[in-house]
Amino acid sequence: MEYLEIKGQKPLEGTVKISGAKNSALPNMAAVILTDEPVVLENVPYLLDMFTMKHLLEHIGVEINEESEGKFSFMFREVNSLEAPYELVSKMRASILVLGAMLTRFRYAKVALPGGCSIGTRPVDLHLSALEKMGARITVEHGYIIAHAPNGLKGAYIKFPKITVTGTENIIMAAVLAEGETVIENPAKEPEVVDLVHMLKKMGADIKGEGTEKIVIKGVKKLSGTSHSIIPDRIEAGTFAVISALSGGRIVIDNYPFEYLEFVHRTLEKIGVSVIPLGKRQALIKKEEKLKPISIETKEYPYFPTDLQAQFMTMLSTVEGLSVITENIFENRFMHVPELKRLGADIKIDGKKAYIRGVKKLSGAQVKATDLRASAAMVIAGLTAEGTTRIYDIYHLDRGYENIDIKLKSLGAEVHRGFEEQ
Ligand code: UD1
């Protein structure tokens, strides 16, 4: 079993570069299904999830070539299969992103039903009911979603009862080639959704209102190829902001997407951490001598992202006083709490709320990475704890953080990957 071992409390210094956003690269890669012309994506991060999406697209029939570092070309001339098999979907729920694109272009799609996962039930009912409104006939058989649209998808009025990021992206992709107009009310406004729309517009899609309360899409007959550069990963940037604040604040963060992190910065200010722009995309993090406890609620963009909740909880676990974190997006996204407690944190959970009473220090221990963002929380804990922390199940980390151990080593952290026979 692979693990990551960290010797804590080393002062970190230097420059770290933020990679392309995982949550933007995934839908943009799925969007190549919508055209038979070449698409080139740049700034694609090298992550396990990217390789899962690459395998899925190749299985469907997309030819993919690596042109240079982070630059990939995609060409979808001939369909090999309109099925997303269980072995790939079970590795990554975001595989569901190919459903809308396959269905709208080929009038058929079969996608394994993503199962429950460690951060809650995460159903896809909203994706399916919206596609049904667009005329799809959907059945779930033997663990597969089977969707037909024999006469093609039709534009429809869709009001999401709850905001869903990949749900919004799936319906946008379905609507760009559907007949007529689709209106999506209450869509996700995340920068990654907006980035997908930017790429689709370059391909010839007619979309208005991305990033607002209402998106209007007029279907077109055909989309062309394009080239597009993936936006920087705001969650990786926020994670490094926390790491920098806790390790002396001498890290310069490059490719830093200030514009996507305004609410996070206001939260950091309240704790006593400020983000200083050194250039258009370069940040330095400064922290006050004594940090302050606060209350945080996770909420859809532009508010505090659930994907930074675990990292902030780790930071607050050594801030004197009582902090409260309310997790509103996912049930069961406190799986990192028992692990933080193994390091000495004092945290109590009551339903959606976690009460964090700051302790003087964390002390190194063996812990598990329980999901993707929880794994980043364990890295932060390991960097700040006294002694050595060994993190197991780090495949979660490799799903979403490009070369995190290499990046940390370059800043002076004592980190190494090891392997242990089970
Ligand atoms: C995306 C992100 C993930 C992030 C999450 C919330 C990607 C690839 N992943 O996940 O990193 O944590 O947004 O910001 O972009 N829901 C339903 N029915 C549905 C769909 C969702 O009830 O059909 C619920 C979910 O259980 C959850 C909430 O809606 O409680 C939000 O989920 P959603 O925005 O869909 O998350 P993902 O798109 O899976």
Image (cartoon, rainbow, N blue to C red):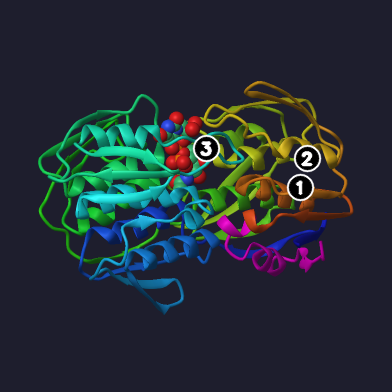
Residue at the image position 49 percent from the left and 65 percent from the top: 51
Q: In which quarter of the image is the C terminus?
A: bottom right
What secondary structure is marked by label 2? helix
Q: How far apart are marks 3 and 1 (CA)?
A: 19 Å
Between marks 2 and 1 in the image, the one whose residue lies nearer the viewer: 2
Residues 400 and 359: in front is 400
Q: Name the residue under label 1.
A: 381
Q: In the picture provided, is 210 more to the left or to the right than 244?
A: left
Task: Find out if the beta carbon at label 3 lies less than 8 Å from the nearest ligand 1 atom.
Answer: yes
Instruction: Identify residue type, mark 1.
Output: Ala
What secondary structure is marked by label 1? helix
Where is residue 345? Give x, y as percent: 82, 35
* CB within 8 Å, label 2 to label 1: yes
Residue at the image position 20 percent from the left and 69 percent from the top: 37
Q: In the picture provided, is 225 more to the left or to the right than 228?
A: left
- Residue 214 sits in quarter: top left
Q: In the picture provided, is 264 more to the left or to the right than 316?
A: left
* CB within 8 Å, label 2 to label 3: no
Rendered image: mark on residue 352 = none
Residues 58 and 389: in front is 58
Q: Name the residue under label 2.
A: 340
Q: Is residue 51 above or below residue 31?
A: below
What secondary structure is marked by label 3? loop
- Residue 133 sits in quarter: top left
Give the magenta-colored segment's residue range: 397-422
Q: Can residue 261 be seen in this view?
A: no
- The single residue placed furthest to the top in the displayed view is 350
The local crowd at label 2, few if under 14, some if 14 to 19, many if 20 or more residues have their Cα within 10 Å, is many
Where is residue 148? Give x, y as percent: 24, 45
Where is residue 6? Give x, y as percent: 80, 59
Q: Mark 3 points at which residue?
A: 305
